[in-house]
Image: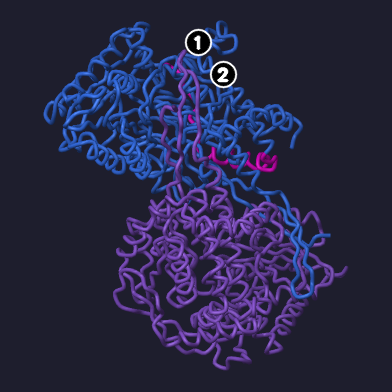
Chain colours: A purple, B blue
Amino acid sequence: MSTHAARLYDRHRPLLERATRACATREYFSPFPETPDRYPDAAEALPRGAAAFEAQLNRPFELVQPGESGRLGDESSPYTGRPLGIDYPRADVDTLFDSAFRAIPTWRDAGPEARTGVCLEIVQALYAELPELVPAVMHTAGQSAAMSYAGSGTNALDRGIEAIVYAHQAMRAIPGEAVWERRFGSTPIRLRKHYRLVPRGVAVCFTCATFPTWNAYPALFASLATGNAVIVKPHPTGVLPMALSVRVARRVLDEAGFDPNLVTLAVDSAAEPLGKRLVKHPATAIVDFTGSARFGAWVEANAHPALAYTETSGVNTVVLDSTGDFEPVARSIATTMSLFSAQMCTSPQNIYVPRGGVSAAGRMMGLDEICEALVAAFKTVASEPKRAASIMAAIQSPDTLGLIDEMRRLGRERGTVLLDSRPYAHPDFPAARTATPLLLRLDTSARDLFCEERFGPIGFVIETDGPTQALQQATADVRAAGGITAFVYSTREDFIDAAESAYAQAGAQLTCNLTGPMPLNFAASYSDYHVTGLNPAGNATLTDPAFVSSRFRIAQSRRPAE
Amino acid sequence: MSTHAARLYDRHRPLLERATRACATREYFSPFPETPDRYPDAAEALPRGAAAFEAQLNRPFELVQPGESGRLGDESSPYTGRPLGIDYPRADVDTLFDSAFRAIPTWRDAGPEARTGVCLEIVQALYAELPELVPAVMHTAGQSAAMSYAGSGTNALDRGIEAIVYAHQAMRAIPGEAVWERRFGSTPIRLRKHYRLVPRGVAVCFTCATFPTWNAYPALFASLATGNAVIVKPHPTGVLPMALSVRVARRVLDEAGFDPNLVTLAVDSAAEPLGKRLVKHPATAIVDFTGSARFGAWVEANAHPALAYTETSGVNTVVLDSTGDFEPVARSIATTMSLFSAQMCTSPQNIYVPRGGVSAAGRMMGLDEICEALVAAFKTVASEPKRAASIMAAIQSPDTLGLIDEMRRLGRERGTVLLDSRPYAHPDFPAARTATPLLLRLDTSARDLFCEERFGPIGFVIETDGPTQALQQATADVRAAGGITAFVYSTREDFIDAAESAYAQAGAQLTCNLTGPMPLNFAASYSDYHVTGLNPAGNATLTDPAFVSSRFRIAQSRRPAE
């Protein structure tokens, strides 16, 4: 191990040990402040980051990597509607793979501790870059400043640390050497054995438009820590956050004495997508994919012989059975379904309600009354512009507005529009692309509408025969269309037991009876397993041992011991 | 956990802990005596097993499992040439899957410790059945009695225990519950979280003709311990060993209060193979495959969405550079290449020799002299009938004799027949299907002959330009055709270093400078990682954490803590 890398490992060992403990106990942990105001020197750092972002606009992004064959870039801000005017290197794909491949041996031979140290130093350097990353995420993904800081910043870095922890543990489980001895007949045989960890090769990491870093960091670090090189393929409408991240990773690798081509960027465009070519490239050993269910399914079926780790999408379900006061339930559901305009893979979409109503505070609330209470809660979220903006933020893709229009039309035909969607006036960005939630009421005959992810601020209240049927329908929909999160409100322990079993089999992570200021769909690093792999919403979990343990292999050599 | 299962876990915990330590240190371990003479009450038990086998001949195999729709069976003994006359239930595939599926919930809900205890009890029961398993393996696979006892008995059970250890560790790494607490704004949120392990579903375990249990036991136990059900699909020419094993597993499961349909047998025939149907069955969640490279490649490419774990075949290589005395080297190579007539996935096939010869005991032995020494060593192995039989045993498939004929013909055309193959007279079984090794000398222009597994007692001496070229050619062949084991003889540390690196990249497990009574290709449970997954010889390792960690998933449920 180089002295520099050894120093990095020593420096970050306390964090590694603390994070390792959190992964085992699943208790709360983060080395980072949760809100931007507590970022070190926030008053100075945040404006400096904003200024750096402004200075980047309408300029080439400086990223020196091999195989540049021209420039491209086509991002525009959901907040201003204006092109960012940033161009990035267009990379020759074969050159990227060749460079990545050549970078691996030194990285591989440096060993697990050196790689762990360097990866944690990259995390630290990304945290230092956070003030510039925040506006980059805002003006590509459309997230609020607070979510850009936490969801795409600190929480994403925590998920990255988590992946490093699991990679470190998986590698440590393989001893470097052993002495083995037994008799064959009367002759003792004594062998010295060496075990070495062999990375798979070059990994391709696809990142998505609305959450560019949250899945990318764990994938990047899981591959990198285990000795592989990584080519990052960002969504063409959201390149800047990962371009910044790749630049940081390359700088840290270089400073630590490693080939920066261990991490490179492959930018493409909607007109000339690179995705399938990267997946089918003969040198691709690992694919991490976050994005659409359609392309995710293609990746899963076609990545072979490369390993595929996917997180796509599904329908996240809410089942209402019974509760105390319904108002805080409605507020939590409405706030969570409004959060980032439901452009999260964990956003609830479908609310299943028994036709006979919901027992609330000892009386039955009828279905109409439930709908009214939900509508009122959604309206409250949208009522105060400053707060509305901090919750709903902006719409990443213009396609989402088209989908809202289509769903409104179909909702009128097939059911009832409980709450219509409209643009809201963002107090800071008058040109922001915005939309308040569309809430439709349907019955189960309209399954073709609700049993599919409708990406964006679109929700369904689905009338069911009763609580048991609500649970059955919801979990059947999860099995069919995928689902990551699920939410149940019930005062009956037997119903909660049944829901826990049903959702465990359907593979959606369940939250019961939660109200209050925590977004229902908040996924805590070190504690919440994200995606089960049991339904079509993805095959990989952030982060379990299976997410890292196949990214390297074990080669051994044995010989007679002296 | 049921009392019975709890007792089993407690009973086997000392073994579990000891085996867990061996997996970590990779030192020698086995709870079983290595040779049949030390089997408990051997003098009584072994004849009793032989008698039980004899009594089974020409009778229906008693296995009561669902969906029986007739009987079938077409095994014959490589030792006697006679049909075994045993028939097995022909199973309706959908019924097997339905029964397996229904058996899972109770098994799943029993939890990791109960399943671990029951799995170790099955191991113990299989060990008790070993006296009957030995003749069953002999008369289907053609192994010697000693190999049937150790390679297909104790060592296979050790690999099974190893899989149970890794499964137990992987499951233990996921806590059952946690309390998580942090503030959102000024509000403390305190959640109690439960994590449950969810098995994938129904696993299909393909077993091969020549080694029916060695890969099957680890696959069976890896799936079973993690909560899945297993349908065993034996090679139609070698059903009996796994039929006995399935019956034992079912009995133990039943006695422990679980549904025996967690383990069932799907017998097919060469005329009506079930393989593809089982792999593509919509309820198949996991496929373990041991067998031909061709079908293995099909499984890897087509199992999706099921997980696929494969071990197929390849070319196992020997590189000669320099040595002390060559005679013990030649003896080790010849003995290992004769062992079970090279019908092992670890048998060496290709010996790469520099044209300029090999430095041995301080002088250069020319290529001709090396060939002569090898031929002499092979002849010695075959010279004494009793010893020859104990090493070479019988040829499992008549196809192998055809392949020997074809290779002899091609060898004469393209190179030299150094040593011809002939039947040898087995002292105990005059009708045994036997063949001594065929050894051909070729140069690298005949790569189409040697760069492919030629299953059976067929070896190649390959002339190369020099030691470096020998290593390059050997590792290139491993990368192209797959390879599990590799063997190098060199007195030069720099050459050994180069070989370790080259084979680690090619993904074959290397043994250096080994001579003496241990077969070169002996793979020790708890110590030797079998198959790297880095070349076409298979994608799964016996046993590393990756072999077990994806066989179950994690579902969670969280709710406000009281």
- As measured in the structure, the alpha-carbon distance from the residue carrying label 2 to the one carrying label 1 is 11 Å
Instruction: Give the residue type that dot 1 points to.
Output: Ala
Instruction: Give the residue type that dot 2 points to.
Output: Glu
**Residue located at (34% from left, 61% from top):** A97
Chain letter of mark 1 equals B
Residue A162, percent from left and from top: 59, 58
Compared across the picture, whether A532 is left or right of A278 comes to right
Could you tell me which quadrant the C terminus of chain A lies in? Answer: top left
Residue B307, percent from left and from top: 48, 47
Disc 2 crowd, CA 10 A, few/some/many (<14, 14-19, 20+): some
Label 2 or label 1, whichever comes before in sequence order: 1
Compared across the picture, whether A452 is left or right of A559 comes to right
The reply to whether residue A440 is in sight is no
Residue receiving disc 2: B129
Q: Is residue B87 magenta?
A: yes
Quick one: SS at disc 2? loop
Residue A299, percent from left and from top: 43, 60
Magenta span dominant secondary structure: helix
Q: Quarter of the image holding residue B386?
A: top left
What range of the chain is rendered magenta? B84-112
- Residue A460 or B450: which is nearer the viewer? B450
Residue B250, percent from left and from top: 60, 28
Quick one: SS at disc 1? helix
Residue located farthest toward the bottom when viewing the structure as drawn: A430
Residue located farthest toward the left when viewing the structure as drawn: B413
Q: Is residue B200 magenta?
A: no
- Residue A204 or B369: which is nearer the viewer? B369
Residue receiving disc 1: B50
Disc 1 crowd, CA 10 A, few/some/many (<14, 14-19, 20+): some
Compared across the picture, whether A505 is left or right of A455 comes to right
The reply to whether residue A289 is in sight is yes
